[in-house]
Amino acid sequence: MKIPGMPTCKEVFEHRYDMNELGFMKKMMIMMHMTICKNCQHFQATMHTLEHKMKDSMKKNTSSADQSEIDSLKKRIKEQINN
């Protein structure tokens, strides 16, 4: 059932890294979607785990993983998700 104004799963994850730039209502609709969508909840948990494992791996493999490298990696992941 499609609820008017409710974003799709794809739209939710297109905005995963830019939530601070969205308006109040858009944020609320995304949060509502995340509350009721089990697929998005599972995907979010998977991405969260993946991000932490990647950060841990970067810390172990390099002595100076800076924030710009992490941001670049997040951007590439986001681009892959959107394609």
Image (spheres, rainbow, N blue to C red):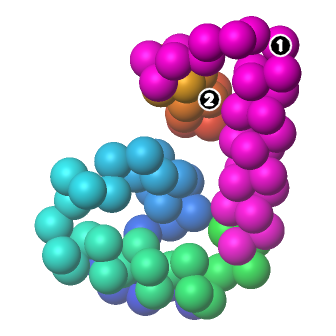
Residue 43 appears in the picture as rendered: no
Question: Around disc 1, counting alpha carbons within 10 Å, would you say few (fewer than 14), some (14 to 19), or many (20 or more)?
Answer: few
Q: Earlier in the sequence, mark 2 or mark 1?
A: 1
Q: Which residue is mark 2?
A: 77
Left or right of 73, for residue 12: left
Q: Marks 1 and 2: in contact by CB < 8 Å?
A: no
Res 53 quadrant in image: top right
Q: Which residue is mark 1?
A: 61
Kind of residue at disc 1 = Asn
**Magenta stretch: helix, strand or loop mostly:** helix
Left or right of 74, for residue 48: right
Left or right of 38, for residue 79: left
In front: 7, or 17? 17
Screen quadrant of the N terminus: bottom right
Which residue occupies 83% across, 13% down? 61
Judging from the image, what secondary structure is the residue with disc 1 in?
A: helix
Which residue occupies 51% across, 18% down? 66
Residue 36 place in picture, x, y as percent = 61, 89
Screen quadrant of the C terminus: top right
In front: 31, or 51? 51
Residue 81 is labelled as: none
Count the marks: how many? 2
Range covered by the magenta-colored residues: 41-69
33 w.r.t. 54: above or below: below
39 w.r.t. 36: above or below: above
Residue 19 place in picture, x, y as percent = 33, 57
| Viewer-nearest of discs 2 and 1 | 1
